[in-house]
Image: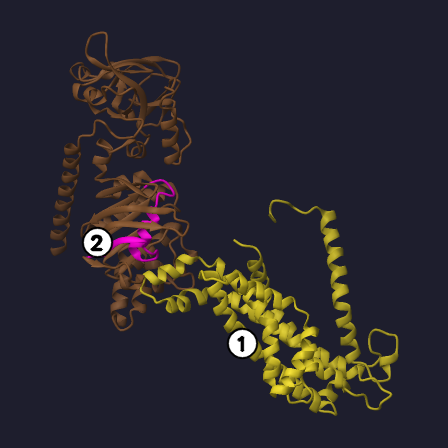
Chain colours: A yellow, B brown
Amino acid sequence: MASSKRLTGRQKLGWAVTTILVLLYALFPVAAIFANSFKTQADLGNPTFWPANWTLTHYEMIFVGSAQDLFLSSLRNSIGITLIATFVAVVLATLCAYAIARLNFPGKRIILGAALAVSIFPVISVVTPLFNLWRTIGLYDTWLGLIIPYLSLTLPISIWTLSAFFRQIPWELEQAAQVDGATQWQAFRKAIIPLAAPGVFTTAILAFFIAWNDFVYGISLTSTEAARPVPAALAFFQGASQFEEPTGAISAAAIVVTIPVVILVLLFQRRIVSGLTQGAVKG
Amino acid sequence: MASITMKNIVKEYDDGFPAVNDISIDIDDGEFVILVGPSGCGKSTLLRMIVGLEDITSGDMLIDGERVNDKPPRERNLAMVFQNYALYPHLTVYENIAFPMRLAKGTFSASDVEEKVQKAAGMLELTEHLDRKPANLSGGQRQRVAMGRAIVRDANAFLFDEPLSNLDAKLRGQMRAEISQLQRSLNTTSVYVTHDQTEAMTLGDRVAVLKKGLLQQIASPRELYEQPANLFVAGFIGAPSMNFLPGTVEPSSTGSMCLNTPLGEIELPEHIAAAGQGKDVVLAGIRPEFFAEASTVDENKRGRGSVVTAELTHVEWLGNEQYGYISYENDPRVVDTLHNLAQDMDSDDLRTQLVVALDAMSRVRGGDSTDLWVDTRRIHLFDPATGENLTRDAEAGAELTRLAAEDRRRERERSAAKAEQ
């Protein structure tokens, strides 16, 4: 496709302009937050984009200063909860997607349909009953209390992505392994899993983002630093006095939590893109 | 090594469609049997039932006398080469070949594995590629890796599922020879599925021709060629395929029996004429090489055939031989039969032209009228209604297959003697 048509100069220019516009639109808020995180408290009200004096006070505040307790504990919660939720989602989704792609069993379509239905169900309508339920059974404000709802967010997309992946792996490989003397489990582990690794990886990253970025569950189902994740903790930052907005500290914390996401994407850009397109287009 | 016995094997899909219908085949220890037929004839399904990747609806599958219907593939100890090779892309060539041995934990020591892989690699000329990944190999090399994986295991039998269909024509010929030699030297029972009749003819000790899940005939390649059981086998085996000329057996003006065809009268030997007598219309199966230019035929040979005159529409010169094409008006009574036949064989020509093999030196060109001599002794007559071969000499056919088995036995003894030295 790409080689069949060469872009003319004008088309190239058009694409370049469009790309720049989209990039500006997408990145401007991030840049603004980035700039804000380096402004002094007094500077924050000024209508200039870049800080007049670059300062690290906000970063100091969240890491070693007054907001340290709030931020560091929530960072720990976020990392722990997200990693566990991602891991569990990927393991369950791998098994489930394999079954969906390979085995014929009644209710296969129902599982896929239910997964889709769950993923489009609005989070906000689930959160209130969940709040009551969690309080009753003692899951409120615990890691597990967040991991379970995060699984409901990450599992559907993981199952869909992975089953698309598994469908592309030639079935003959598994059959060849069986003829070569493997049990079904051995064939899965030795012939299918290594091939599905890029897909599993892509899925893990997607699941990680989803759990990492969640706000609604994070703020509704936690009350202390025992389980509160970073996006929720940002809302509890306080200024030096009640007349000061904690804009600088929030910006600094936002930048800090964005870093792992950016690093992940930069490191695995190729894999994510190939994973996403492979999942989307068959063959 | 083992014999494979299929007794009344049936494969019915959920919708009731019988992909394989009551097939019984006995495969002797060390024999090379080909399953051939157009796509959808059930040949691959049958192979997959032998190896255990497909359930058997009814019938018995015996390997070395033991019923294996309910055994999973890994307990049948068979090796299979898949059409798309099914190599493990994440493993090196070495590990691909060693894979079956790695699975059988404890059976093979590290030095066993090393020795067997090196031996197989040497046999298949893969030694210098052992550290490469399958993705970096050519089609022929991948094919050989797949075979290497099959031969390291001392399997009971080799099963091939159209192993050469992904290769280009030249490589296919080469690999065909290699598979043949490998099988002869290892003497392992083999079942080979193909839709290519050249592969079937050159590789097989016996060839089973299938159509729509039914076994049409199983015999040595020569018997299939010389004594086909029916219209389908006759048309399927041989390239270019057999001509089917409609005609009626009648007494000619000279009094002898002859076949009245759109090309004119062809005199028939008595026993052939007798078989076709009384039929409203018959199809005369005449292979292209049964024809020759009358002027090139020896005087004493000419008497054993008949001569017709026809106008060639065009000729194809291929270097070693030459094919002439003759158009003729088809008999409306056989149009349906030939149409169905073409459909059964996956082709769409309606065969209203005759192909004749001419000497490569012949100067006959398209548009010329020429006298063609037909070797009438080898003509077969088919019943258009049933497709049955009316002139099949079962005894002569069985003799051909017996001779082939004899040849094979001698060959085996020779290779065994060679191995002992």
Which residue sits at x=57%, y=77%?
A85
Q: Which residue is mark 1?
A: A87
In the image, residue B349 lies at what x, y percent? 41, 29
- Amino acid at the residue labelled 1: Phe
Q: Which residue is mark 2?
A: B188
- Vertical placement of residue A264 versus B56, above or below: below
- The image shows a total of numbered marks equal to 2
- Vertical placement of residue A219 versus B226, above or below: below
Callout 1: chain: A
- Amino acid at the residue labelled 2: Thr
Q: Is residue B1 visible to the viewer in this orientation of the structure?
A: no
In the image, residue A170 lies at what x, y percent? 44, 57
> Is residue B107 shown in magenta?
no
Placement of the N terminus of chain B among the 4 image quadrants: bottom left
Between marks 1 and 2, how big is the CA–CA gap? 48 Å
Q: Quadrant of residue B282?
A: top left
Mark 2 lies on a secondary structure that is: loop
Which residue sits at x=31%, y=58%?
B52
| Left or right: A168 as drawn, with respect to B292 | right
Which residue sits at x=64%, y=73%?
A261
The answer to which of B201 and B132 lies nearer the viewer is B201
Q: Which residues are magenta?
A: B37-64
Q: Residues within 10 Å of mark 2 (few under 14, many from 20)?
A: many
Which residue sits at x=60%, y=47%?
A3
Callout 2: chain: B
The answer to which of A151 and A277 lies nearer the viewer is A151
In the image, residue B187 lies at what x, y percent? 19, 52
